[in-house]
Amino acid sequence: MHVWLNGEYQNADDAVVAVTDRGFLLGDGFFETMRAHRGVVAWLPAHMERLAKHADMVGLPANLLPAQADVTAIVAKLCTQADLSSAVVRISVSRGSGPRGLLPPETPTPTVLITVAPFAPAATSDGLRLITAQKIRRNPWSVAGTIKSLNYLDNIVAKQEADQAGGDDALILSVDGSVAETTIANLFGIKDGVLWTPDAATGILCGLARTFVINLARANRVDVGFEAKSPDELGDMDFLFTVNALQGLRRVATLDGKPIGAPSEIHTLFARISQMVDAKLCDGMWL
């Protein structure tokens, strides 16, 4: 498998990052994951815009990132080399090497890595089993929590909790105890025909797929609410689902072992949203 590292195509086994790299030592950097079909990345302009925003938030000049046209060519070549028609693309950006201490160098030289891997659709199931994380809370004031930071330790620990409890993923709460998101996806609920999702103020990473679903719902005259909810209130939802740009929409069957909604029924509004997303798939909006 080949990767693109700092301007060069290399064999993955031969590619190296300096031991002084701040991404390795301090988690000083960010990443973006995307889906590609036949070498073409879905929503690439939006992904590149979010990378630039991440760079701005951590004080890294965005002009040091690869240009969109370059990313287009790099991904196409990597997918061809790997013979992948459907791929997961990841762009990882570290601030690069620097002296000891927390303050970054005044003129950073970022480490930029682009990789591709086979895309595997989510396994068919009766729905996700969510477990409420006890060790982790989202912090609305945390920079690392509201970007795709290279330090993903909170999500790793929460995922371990869920796995040890027999769940598929963890529900993470905000510092005030309100519902935030899962380790890898944004959360949506349906109650009395209204679509609901946690507000950005809970400290979530607002994913592109989240924005897509919200805009799609509003364009089709579906009301969307953002009020704070406790985990207990999720039990009263008619339907609960997660969404991210890799796996799309996935139903939540249980939360901490308790069923959400009717176990054997797919909610009408969820079916409508799924159909809308499928229609956009045909337009190339979501590959």
Image: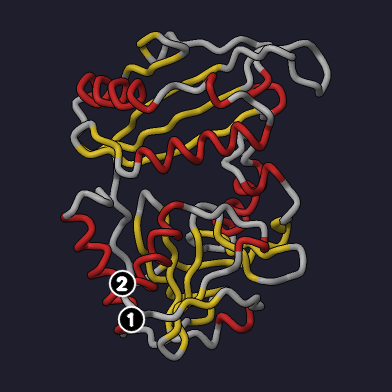
Q: Is residue 133 above or below residue 107?
A: below
> Disc 2 versus disc 1: distance between alpha carbons?
6 Å
State the image quarter where residue 75 is shown: top left
Question: What amino acid does circle 1 point to?
Answer: Leu
Q: Quadrant of the N terminus?
A: top left
Q: Is residue 23 above or below residue 273?
A: above
At 57% from the left and 74% from the top, the residue drawn is: 226
Q: Is residue 84 left or right of residue 242?
A: left
Q: Is residue 274 above or below residue 47?
A: below
Q: Are marks 2 and 1 in contact (CB under 8 Å)?
A: yes
At 39% from the left and 65% from the top, the residue drawn is: 215
Q: Which numbered tag is attached to residue 164?
A: none
Picture coordinates of residue 283, whole percent (x, y): 18, 53
Q: Which residue is mark 1?
A: 269
Q: Is residue 117 above or below residue 272?
A: above
Q: Helix, strand, or loop for circle 1?
A: helix
Picture coordinates of residue 83, whole percent (x, y): 19, 26
Q: Is residue 136 visible?
A: no
Q: Is residue 125 visible?
A: yes
Q: Helix, strand, or loop for circle 2?
A: helix
Outermost residue to the left = 282
Outermost residue to the right = 101
Looking at the picture, tell me which residue is in the foreground, 193 or 122: 193
Q: Is residue 79 left or right of residue 65?
A: left
At 61% from the left and 61% from the top, the residue drawn is: 200
Question: What amino acid does circle 2 point to?
Answer: Ile
Label 1: few (<14), some (14–19) or many (≥20) C-alpha neighbours in 10 Å: some
At 81% from the left and 23% from the top, the residue drawn is: 102
Q: Which numbered tag is attached to residue 273?
A: 2
